[in-house]
Image (cartoon, rainbow, N blue to C red):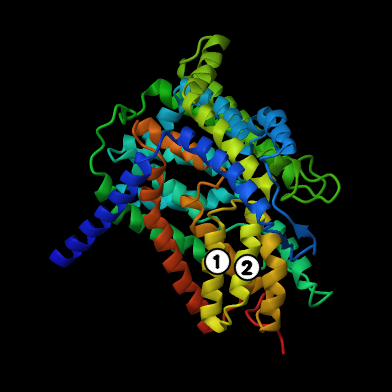
Amino acid sequence: MPALQEKKSGIDRFLSVIERIGNALPHPATLFAGFALLVIILSWVASLFDMAVVHPGTGETVAPVNLVSAEGLHMILTRMVTNFTGFAPLGTVLVSLLGIGIAEGTGLIGAVLRLVVLASPKRLLTFVIVFAGVMSNTASEVGYVLLVPLAAIIFLAAGRHPLAGLAAAFAGVSGGYSANLLLGTIDPLLAGLSTEAARIIDPNYAVNPAANYYFMFVSTFLIAGLGTWVTEKVVIPRLGEYTGDEKPESIDRLNTQEKRGILYAGIAVLLMVAFILGGLIPENGYLRNPETGEILHSPFMSGIVAFIFILAGVAGIAYGIGAKTIKNDSDVMRGMAKSMETLGSYIVLVFFAAQFVAYFNWTNLGLILAINGAEVLKTMGLSGIPLMIMFILVAASINMVMGSASAKWAIMAPVFIPMFMLLGYTPEFTQVAYRIGDSVTNIISPMMSYFALIVAFIQRYDKKAGIGTVISTMLPYSITFLIGWIIMFIIWILLGLPIGPGAELYMPK
């Protein structure tokens, strides 16, 4: 026990140093503004030294774009507004929270939280939240905008530190991005890129969207278990007791009016679910893709944020009518307005983060770094398990400077899939190795689209928190997920198990 305690205190000291260093930096918004300025300078330096590379997929030359030029100045000035308004997470968050504001303002969320806390065994609460985070990836961004803040509220209502709940949910949503019991929108996207890369060697090769399903299925429980362990054994002891200003939701049992409100909300949700299923189950359903009949690339999946807004709004209004917490339409609008009041600091943060991400994309610096990193791995001369582990680490490192999973794979797949096919590994196997690396550093990468949102969520409970708080809190998850997934990956190789339907590890001889 003394040795274990010493180890824990050592981990705690290390994370505290990271947090202090990170939070000693300027305000996150100022930091992103500084990053944007740094990118401008680096674009000039890269152009000065002509740091051009050849794109492995298209064969085209990728040259750095110099923003310290008349053309760069014009881009900065004319696209500043659209950088901000077009920043993907902004609209998603605002629209979702308008609906959630109705549900919160009428009291529905508080009532449901009390039911969850009262009904769930305390020892399973963390596991359920991490598991729900992993599963939320099927519905695209819903985990970030709904589950992450909700998990903090649930933990606070259960008498636990809200940041521990937030961290557990974020770990599942983002760190478990490549684990699920169901296929999501990313699966056919990556499979399409893998197919194109595989056809460099075999013109008839096709990668199925379910090619990694077996590995993803088992990974769901691995990530949920590891996420629970890190939360309980590392994060919660380090955070200690919550002493902030936020007050927990009451956990008294529901009264008669609240029960009636829950009933009305439940009926409203069932009607909405029936409407959704009516559009998805028939082959020509009105929510399917009208041309292909697909669900993954359909108006339903593209409009998932709209459904969050409508579902939360309808359920909140139904609850308010049943529980008599709303008297007229003004009460509904007041709830929506209140949810927007809490987003002031987030909107400021997003403005500068959006400029930084846009500048970084314009300059091609991310592409150049990714292609150079891939070339370094090619020249290392490794084989077998060490080669695949190094590939995972390269993908994880590139994820720190390039957030989009599909954009990275579009660069890496044409390099590594043909190379690994020639070494005897299937494209499906290479793809699953990439997905491990892409997932584990999501939770500590400032390039992840929703990183700024997580900072804003944390600042609700800790006004002094910054990027250092996020990274120090999430780093144990990142390291644990990486080690755990690599061990599982090695065991999978040694046992020679298929990673999906019809997807073996090795090319047929």
Residue reaching furthest to the left: 2
Between marks 1 and 2, how big is the CA–CA gap? 8 Å
- Indicate which disc residue 126 carries: none
Q: Quadrant of the N terminus?
A: bottom left
In the picture, measured across the screen, residue 9 lies left or right of residue 429, that is left
Q: How many marks?
A: 2
Please tell me whether residue 384 is drawn above or below residue 78 in the rendered image. Answer: below
**Mark 1: which secondary structure?**
helix
Q: Residues within 10 Å of mark 1 (few under 14, many from 20)?
A: some
Say whether disc 1 or disc 2 marks the residue closer to the N-terminus: 2
Residue reaching furthest to the right: 291
Please tell me whether residue 29 is drawn above or below residue 479 in the rendered image. Answer: above
Q: Position of residue 506 (x, y in %)?
A: 65, 82
Amino acid identity at mark 1: Val
To which residue does mark 1 refer?
394
In the picture, measured across the screen, residue 45 lies left or right of residue 189, that is left
Instruction: Look at the image and tell me whether residue 79 can be seen.
Output: yes
Residue at (64% x, 53% y) in the render: 46
Residue at (27% x, 58% y) in the render: 11
Most foreground residue, 65 or 185: 65
Amino acid identity at mark 2: Ala
Do labels 1 and 2 touch, CB within 8 Å? Answer: yes
